[in-house]
Image (cartoon, rainbow, N blue to C red):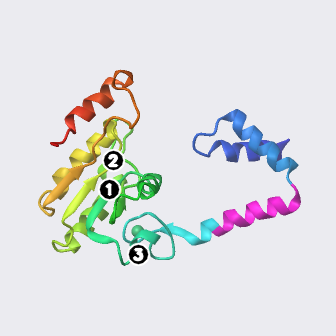
Amino acid sequence: MKALERIIGVFRKFPGVGPKQAERFALYVVRASDPEIEDLVEALRAVKASVNYCRECYNYAEGDLCPVCADAHRDRSSICVVERPQDLAAIEKAKSFSGVYHVLHGAVSPAAGVAPEHIKLKELLDRVRASDGGVKEVIIATNPDADGEATAMYLIRLLKPYVQKITRIAYGVPLGGDIDYMDEVTLGYALKGRIKI
Ligand SMILES: [Zn+2]
């Protein structure tokens, strides 16, 4: 069953897919009709041929610019820095941010051997410098874990000479949540990020 083993091997490479799930995907393919398979192959080819990185922010884009950077109404003086395109999509869904983004495609991680040059940090620095003071605020929205924090610290050092205002998003109490059910790390961040009312 060489062909079956091969497709299971292909699915195993997908992020977060274990052996059982890879096998289920493979069996779906075995049972699928010819048009369904053609659709799958065509969708894979199309995404590979047309989806690239946005030349401004490194979000996914069909063409030169992603939908955010292509929107003339977005405020280019404010850049929100995220680790992954999925983070950008999540913030967009919240509809609370009218600036633009920069996607790092990872976080600096001494433990996993990810150095600053492995992610799109230099590209952010180049972008900020090229704006010649046009970028007034950089909002750091990396994950609240060790790597996200290390990346945030690195960003602050890197950008400080060029940007007036560097902020970090606040992590807080979930709405409708109970304080006594919160873990201490989240609660610690919520306290650190408290604001005057
Ligand atoms: Zn973009």
* Quarter of image, ligand 1: bottom left
Chain part drawn in magenta: 33-46
Name which of mark 2 and mark 3 comes first in the sequence: 3
Q: Are marks 3 and 1 in contact (CB under 8 Å)?
A: no
Q: What secondary structure prevails in the magenta region?
A: helix
Residues at marks 1 and 2, CA–CA distance in whole angstroms: 7 Å
- Answer few, some or many: residues within 10 Å of disc 2's Cα (few below 14, many 20 plus, some between 14 and 19): many
Amino acid at pointer 1: Val
Nearer the observer, 6 or 134: 134
**Is 100 rendered above or below residue 90?**
below
Nearer the observer, 137 or 3: 137
List the residue tagged with mark 3: 71
Relative to 181, is 128 on the left or the right? left
Identify which residue is drawn at 21% across, 45% down.
Answer: 153
Name which of mark 3 and mark 1 comes first in the sequence: 3
Residue 18 in percent (x, y) is at: 65, 35
List the residue tagged with mark 1: 81
Residues at marks 2 and 3, CA–CA distance in whole angstroms: 24 Å
Residue 24 in percent (x, y) is at: 76, 39
